[in-house]
Image (cartoon, grey):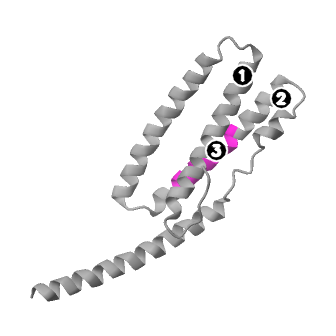
């Protein structure tokens, strides 16, 4: 009897493993359909702007685009994850949002006496941090079959 149970459990684990791979492949394709790069202006592109106002606007556009993509990646992941995975992602994202906001305040404080450069520094930092979170989530959600992404 014990051997039969082990055999059934082994078959069940093989099926789960196979379905997990199919799930990860489907999630990978769904994320790929969203686009794998943020597609926003790079920090270098923003530094080519003629004045501080336009540099900050450029970084703010990067931030908005990255934030929109982050929301899309998160929403797509929530469609495909199991309930326990959804709960953990939700907890992780809430913690990251708190971390993000606290870091933004820290950067503001560090650059408080930096004049107009402070607005450039903060805008660039905000955009870069969210772009990195997008890459991080994509990397985590690809599963073992995905390509390695620098984040």
Q: Distance between the residues labelled 2 and 1?
A: 11 Å
**Which mark lies nearer to you, 3 or 2?**
3
Based on the picture, tell me whether residue 135 belongs to the magenta stretch. Answer: no
Give the x, y percent position of residue 135.
60, 51
Contact, mark 2 vs mark 1 (Cβ under 8 Å): no
Cβ atoms at labels 3 and 2 below 8 Å apart: no
Q: Mark 1 points at which residue?
A: 119
Q: Nearer the viewer, residue 70 or 145?
A: 145
Element under disc 1? helix
Who's the residue at 49% across and 67% down the image? Answer: 144
The image position of residue 71, as x and y in percent, is: 57, 48
Q: Which residue is under mark 3?
A: 131
Q: What element carries label 3?
A: helix
Spot occupied by residue 89 in the image (x, y as percentages of width and height): 42, 50
Instruction: Give the structural element (helix, strand or loop) at label 2.
Output: helix
Relative to residue 48, is residue 52 depicted above or below?
above
Left of 11 or right of it: where is 92? right
Say which residue label 2 marks. Answer: 54
Q: Does the segment drawn in magenta span residue 72?
A: yes
N-terminal label among 2 and 1: 2
Residue drawn at x 61%, y 45% is 132
Location of residue 99 with respect to 25 vertically, above or below: above
């Amino acid at each position: 009897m014990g051997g039969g149970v082990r055999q059934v459990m082994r078959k069940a684990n093989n099926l789960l493993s196979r379905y997990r791979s199919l799930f990860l492949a489907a999630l990978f394709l769904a994320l790929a359909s969203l686009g794998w790069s943020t597609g926003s202006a790079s920090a270098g592109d923003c530094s080519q702007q003629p004045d501080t106002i336009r540099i900050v606007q450029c970084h703010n556009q990067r931030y908005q685009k990255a934030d929109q993509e982050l929301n899309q990646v998160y929403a797509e992941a929530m469609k495909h994850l199991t309930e326990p995975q959804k709960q953990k992602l939700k907890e992780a994202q809430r913690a990251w949002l708190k971390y993000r906001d606290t870091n933004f305040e820290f950067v503001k404080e560090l650059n408080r006496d930096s004049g107009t450069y402070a607005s450039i520094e903060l805008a660039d930092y905000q955009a870069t941090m969210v772009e990195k979170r997008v890459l991080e989530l994509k990397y985590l959600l690809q599963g073992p079959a995905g390509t390695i992404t620098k984040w």
